[in-house]
Amino acid sequence: MTQETNPETIENSGAPCAVSNSAKSSTGRSENNPYANALMQFDRAVAHLDLKRGVVDMLRCPKRELTVNFPVMLDTGQIQMFRGYRVHHSVVRGPTKGGIRYSSDVTLDEVRALAMWMTWKCALMNLPYGGAKGGVVVNPKQLSNRELERLTRRYATEISVLMGPESDIPAPDVGTNPQVMAWIMDTYSMHRGFSVPAVVTGKPVEIGGSLGRTEATGRGVGFCIIEALRMRGISPGDATVAIQGFGNVGSVAARMVHEMGMRVIAISCSTGGLYRSDGIDPLKVTRHLEHGGCMTTFEGADSISNEELLTLDCDVLIAAAVENQITSFNADRVKAKILAEGANGPTTPEADDILKEKGTFVIPDVLCNAGGVTVSYLEWVQDLQSFFWPVDEINRKLQYLMAKAFESVSETVQQYMVSSREAAQILAIQRISDAILIRGIYP
């Protein structure tokens, strides 16, 4: 049995995977630090495995971290400095894979956590990847399209020492989109002297993107919910759903569950939310937003806050916003029977304990939102072979892989008598540990 380690105790040890002091509370345990949460989840999972201490230490720390500070010429002619990151957590099972986010809230600890979660996600889905993540500290809404392009191309150049179709393959995340991926692919290709479409995924179909990629994460959430409802003996036609976060993931998941006959009773985004007990049509909300409206001006539903949405009486709660939404402060008020984590890290370890006591079934993020990286893998494969599948084939492959992973997690829950999150990470960590030992330690 491997001894559990408190992720906070390594701070003063000089370890490269130490948690930032600035993110800690006065008690020494920061529930809002995603990297501290990721390490605590990891320690809980490895406590059930008989792993070599050195392997555990290896998996607790990112393999490499790159911080870049770079200038961008604004439309006004002024030069502004920006900070960006790219973190590789593991390369044991293949090249690293992970998104790039543009947000004023990006921190190194956040990127570290997201890279670690990507490692578990790829291993859980049995994809030949390790985990990575990147980010730039910027509010993209404050930049013009031309400024955003200049920032993207400069950031891509700065991290190009790590990027490559056989080494590190970025993808979209919060604040980025297919156009950003197109700029990154073009920048990398210009430096190489020829087109390299496989260097990124989530790019437009016109330049080697995959059909079904944009909707993949939300569709994966929907597939997982169907499996969870079946396990709980709830008919989709009888299920009520509340959705926090109406971006790419939340909106696609909302449309999918609505089409399957579930009743969407609440939707929210950063500006506010909507509630209607007899159901909201997500397509009408999407059209309203596309025509310049916002949640607060949508007619036919009552206003609701994000905090109120999380505690609604419903069958399924989809957390598709950002990290640390369900914590020890509100987990006891969550009434949903099933929590589907469309976002990365929406639930803290303290909240996990409370939800487990309440009997809430959590579909963990490394499983629930793995549809995106799964279709990214399919896109990468298509780019490498220059042969593309129709969208029906993509969706069929996605559903098969999601259902297979869900089944594997369910079997691991029964084998170890643990929560679904611990089971998902146990399965992933064991696969990576096996790969480390089979490859051996160089030299």
Image: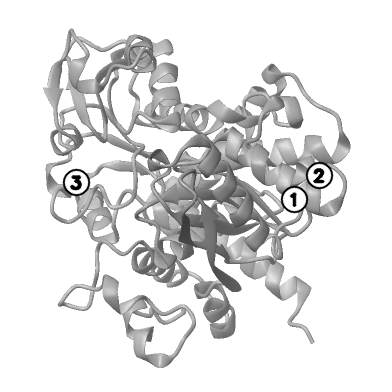
Task: Determine the CA span between mark 1 and mark 2.
Answer: 7 Å
Which residue is labeled 2 in the image?
A: 196
Q: Nearer the viewer, mark 1 or mark 2?
A: 1
* Residue labelled with disc 3: 358
Q: Quadrant of residue 317?
A: top left
Front residue of 163 and 418: 163
Q: Are marks 1 and 2 in contact (CB under 8 Å)?
A: yes
Q: Earlier in the sequence, mark 2 or mark 3?
A: 2
For the residue pair 126 and 73, the one nearer the viewer reads as: 73
Locate residue 189 relative to residue 254 in the image: left or right: right
* Image point (42%, 25%), residue name: 253
| Residue 260: assigned label | none
**Considering only vertical position in the picture, is 292 above or below 338?**
above
Q: N-terminal of the two: label 1 or label 2?
A: 1
Nearer to us of marks 3 and 1 is 1
Q: Residue at x 19, y 9 (%)?
A: 299
Q: Position of residue 151 (x, y in %)?
A: 55, 50
Q: Which residue is mark 1?
A: 188
Tell me which residue sits at (53%, 75%) in the image. Answer: 50
**Quadrant into which the C terminus falls:** bottom right
